[in-house]
Image (spheres, rainbow, N blue to C red):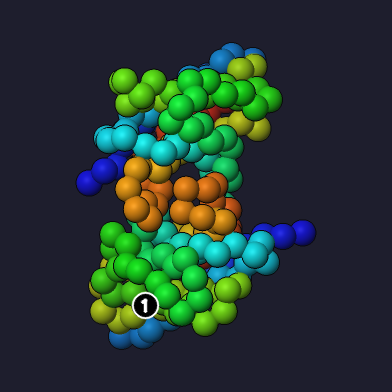
Amino acid sequence: DGGITQSPKYLFRKEGQNVTLSCEQNLNHDAMYWYRQDPGQGLRLIYYSQIVNDFQKGDIAEGYSVSREKKESFPLTVTSAQKNPTAFYLCASSRGYNQPQHFGDGTRLSIL
Amino acid sequence: SQQGEEDPQALSIQEGENATMNCSYKTSINNLQWYRQNSGRGLVHLILIRSNEREKHSGRLRVTLDTSKKSSSLLITASRAADTASYFCASNYTGANSKLTFGKGITLSVRP
């Protein structure tokens, strides 16, 4: 079955450490997204990509970085510059920007 | 911010009753989408309504769109305990490469 796989499900970050969240899709979608979800805040867009080797900043990109070397993969790195990284991170993909998005089951990141 | 608003923020009903959730958005849209999120999981797309449509049905779901009021409603008929979840509306605003803008969500509790 096609879908989006996020790993790990839970992740802990130490002070000053960079961590990478994985997102893989086998839906053959061109567009991929990363969102951050905090309680009561809804979803906020971190980065998005429409094609391989191209990506754009969303509303809250500071302290995060991404790459899109393959169509299927869109990993997110939470850098030490992100001072408040504790949140639920969701990856999504779609055929196009105005199309329905398919979501992974998220990664919950906490600080040790 | 172009984030719209949903109301109510929380809704508690008895199994078998209908649940109505409302969403307002800011400017002109290509389409509006509704998503559902179970606790600790990713979002699941429910229904998409285009700007030139006024009503759409999918099973027990009915969505309406009033572009003059910049608002949409999601009706779940004959609710079940399994409908307990958070529901989000997402606006696809007009403009080049416009992404989805999600609301903060509505928490629906259906009592058995």
Q: Nearer the viewer, residue A27 or A23?
A: A27
Q: Is residue A81 above or below residue B86?
A: below
Q: Residue at x 28, y 63 (%)?
A: A60
Q: Residue at x 52, y 20 (%)?
A: B55
Whether residue B87 is visible: no
Q: Position of residue B91 (x, y in %)?
A: 39, 40
Q: Is residue B3 left or right of residue B10?
A: left
Q: Is residue B71 left or right of residue B73?
A: left
Task: Residue A12: name its quadrant.
Answer: bottom left
Q: Is residue A26 left or right of residue B53?
A: right
Whether residue A49 is visible: yes
Chain letter for mark 1: A
Dot 1 alpha-carbon crowd within 10 angstroms: few under 14, some 14 to 19, many 20 or more:
some
Q: In what element is the residue under mark 1?
A: strand
Outermost residue, left direction? B1
Q: Residue at x 65, y 65 (%)?
A: A28
Outermost residue, top direction? B17
Q: Nearer the viewer, residue A10 or B4?
A: B4
Q: Which residue is mark 1?
A: A65
Outermost residue, right direction? A1
Q: Nearer the viewer, residue B43 or A30?
A: A30
Count of numbered labels shown in the rendering: 1
Q: Is residue A67 above or below residue B43?
A: below
Q: Position of residue B98 (x, y in %)?
A: 36, 51
Q: Position of residue B57 (x, y in %)?
A: 61, 23
Q: What is the three-letter code of the residue carrying label 1?
A: Ser
Q: Quadrant of the N terminus of chain A?
A: bottom right
Q: Position of residue A58 (x, y in %)?
A: 32, 62
Q: Quadrant of the C terminus of chain A?
A: bottom left
Q: Residue at x 38, y 84 (%)?
A: A18
Q: Is residue A13 above or below residue B110?
A: below
Q: Is residue B30 left or right of residue B14?
A: left
